Every structure is written in C-alpha cells, then in structure tokens.
Image (cartoon, rainbow, N blue to C red):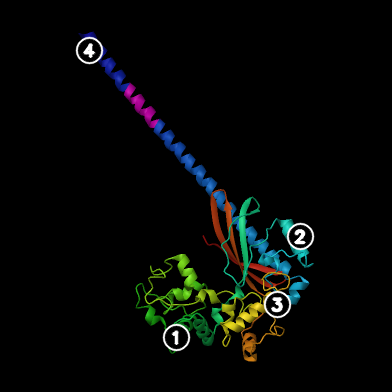
Amino acid sequence: MVKTRNLTRRTSRAGIALIIVMLVIGTLAALVSVFAYNMKVEAALARNANSQLQLEWTARSLAEGAAALLAKTAQTTRWQQEGDMVNQIWAGRDLAEFVDDNEPLLALMEATGLPLPAEFNARDPLPPLTPVKDFRGAMVDYRIEPMAARYNINVAQREYLLQALFVMQADEADADLIADSILDWIDPDDATHLAGTESEFYERLDPPYVAKNGLIDDMTELLLVRGIRENPELFYGPAQMSQQGMPFGGLSAEELNPPIPVAYGLNDLFTAISSVTIHLNAARSEALQVIPGMTPEWAEQIADYRVGFDQVEGTEDDQPGDIGRMGVAIPPDVLTGLQQAGATNRGAIFRVTMKIALHEHEGTWVAILRRGSPTDVQVLTFYRES
C-alpha cells in the first residue's frame, strides 16, 4: 500500500513537472513568436523609413536641379533678350535644334541626370504629374511654374480685386464686401473699410478667430475671409470644386446655397508669393484681366501675340510679351495699366512641384525658389504636399 502511494506521488509530481515544462516551452514559443513579429515589423518600418527618406532627398535633389536650371537659363543671351519664355527648357520644351543657348542647359542636365521638366502651359489647364522619368533610382516628374503668372494678392489694390470679381462673374452685390474684407484681412490696422470686416465679426463665429492683419502667406487663408468662407466656390472656381467634391464646409459644388456661377476662382487669378509683378510671357489671359480696364478680348490678343504665327504655345516662333512691341490693338490706358502693375517678362519667384515614386511609396513635394540674380537662385521653402 505504501509503495502504491509513493508511486502515485511520484507520478503526480512527474505530471506536474511535465505540465510546468510545457507551459515554459509554450511561453518561450509565444515570446519568440512575438519577438519575431516585432522584428518583422521593425524591419518593415526601417525599410519604409529608408524609402521615405530616399523619396525626400530625391525631391531635394530635384529642387536643387531646378534651381541650377533656372540660374543657367538666366545666364544665356536669349534670356537677356526675351526673359522667361514657355518655349524654354525650364517649361518642359527641348528645342535645342534652333537655340544655341540651350547647349549649356542640356550639358547641365546630362551631367546631373536631371530629366526634362513637365510642360508648363500658360493657356490650358496643367495636367497632373505622373512619375515616369528615372532620376537616381526613383521615378519622378516635376514642373516649374513662375509664380508671377498670377497677380500678387498682397499688393492688389481695391480696383484690382473688384476687377477680378468682375472677371469671375461673381455677384456684384457681394463684390464690395469681399474686396474690402480681403483688404481688412491684409492691412495691419483694425480700421474697417467701408464694406469690410475686421475681427469683431470673426470673433462671433464658432469657432471664433481674428482677422490676420498681415500679409497672406498661403492663398487658402482666403477661405477664412467673410464672403468667401460662406461661398468657397469663389476661391476654388467651378473646375476645382467639381474635382475636390467637398472642399470646404462639408458642401459640394451642387449643394452650395445659393450657387455662385463664377467663371474662375480667386486661386486661378492670384498668388500669395511672387514679386510684385505679373509675368507677361506666362500669365493666363484670365490673370491678365485682373488689370483694371483689361477686357477678355485684349487679354486674348496678348496671349495670341505671345504664341506667334502658328498659334501653338511652346514652339520656335513664340514671342516675348513686350509691352512696347506687342503691336496689338490695345488702348494706351490699358497698356499704361500693365506698366503701372509692374508687368514684366522675367520671373523672380518659381514654384517647383515634384511627384516621386519608389517601390510602393509615392509622394508630392513643393519647393519655392527665388532667383535674385543669374548666379543666385535660393530655395525659400521646401515641404511635402501629399
């Protein structure tokens, strides 16, 4: 009997020990599995971080390449005579067969591996960028745009804003309110223009905020301005509204009440970052119409003059938009308005938009460049857009 009890105890202890061993092994197996999973996640994160870092530095390299291209362009005899033309390499046109000045630009691109930019078009909407060009192991596409192709809203006087709203076909009853509210948003004081809006209106909103009383840094600030915040189609324009669906306030273009049949948006006509001039060689006809007294017909005549006899933009016979040589039937007072607006054919501030893809990763970056002189092109800002 005693032997049987001892055997039972030993068997029980052995079973307990076996269970403990199995629990330990199971715990260790679970820990190993968790460790292996964590290592897999860490490896994936490391790969992703490396890819994202490579994407960013590819974008930075593209921005510096664009800066070098703009600097080299401004050192050519052709630029000294014509300024920035949309049949030049920076605008995506490789017309080396008829312009000797393109040779140093092509040499720069060959030495650095910089691909030809996507086309910039001053007449038609710009197509989306598609990363299909090889650059340092990544697929890229990028576009260079002169910011002065639109008028600088920070220097726009009241008559320019009213003219823009007229071009947009906005409701005349709201034009004074919107123009004065924009001026109140920009000016440094708290004095209200005749039909304008200062902080006391915005402080009653939910959530409340105050008028900036400073220069506009980004055009989307206009979505906070009275008259535009209630009708974002005034900012986006009908084309961009339909693309974005519900860009602001939870309302689609079809749901806006009342609908505003604008032809363009303020974002099509103005920029917040440029020199104080408008670029005669690159401005769209609707942006030219911001100049008081400019009609759609005269703006189109300027655009037609620029593209030359073949009426195709970006070809050999394009002509610079020189006010003194345009020879179009534009009244002298309108030409005077262009001169007073600081119209020029040379850009100082440029936007470089870059779309880059590497493996399964993709992103869009933006760089703002300033050309102070033919040998001084600086990157003012660089950021990821998406």
Q: Compute the Cα span from label 4 to label 3.
A: 110 Å
Element at label 2:
helix
Q: Percent x, y for residue 172? A: 44, 85
Give whichever of discs 1 and 2 has the lower sequence position. 2
Q: Is residue 22 magenta-colored?
A: yes
Tell me where the magenta segment starts and ends, as one range: 18-28
Q: Please name the amino acid that badge 3 sits on.
A: Pro
Q: Nearer the viewer, residue 193 or 120?
A: 120
Quarter of the rendering containing residue 4: top left
**Quadrant where the N terminus lies?**
top left
Cβ atoms at labels 4 and 1 below 8 Å apart: no
**For numbered disc 3, what is the local secondary structure?**
loop
Three-letter amino acid code at disc 2?
A: Ala
Tell me the number on the disc at residue 5.
4
Residue 172 got which mark? Answer: 1
- Is residue 345 visible in this depiction of the protein? no
- Determine which residue is flagged by label 3: 320
Name the mark nearer the viewer: 1 or 2. Answer: 1
Q: Is residue 145 left or right of residue 82?
A: left
Helix, strand, or loop for circle 4? helix
Q: In terms of secondary structure, where does tag 1 sit?
A: helix
CA–CA distance in space, label 1 to label 2? 54 Å
Which residue sits furthest left?
1
Q: Is residue 218 magenta?
A: no
Contact check, label 4 and label 2, Cβ < 8 Å: no
According to the picture, the residue beneath numbered tag 2 turns out to be 107
Q: Nearer the viewer, mark 4 or mark 1?
A: 1
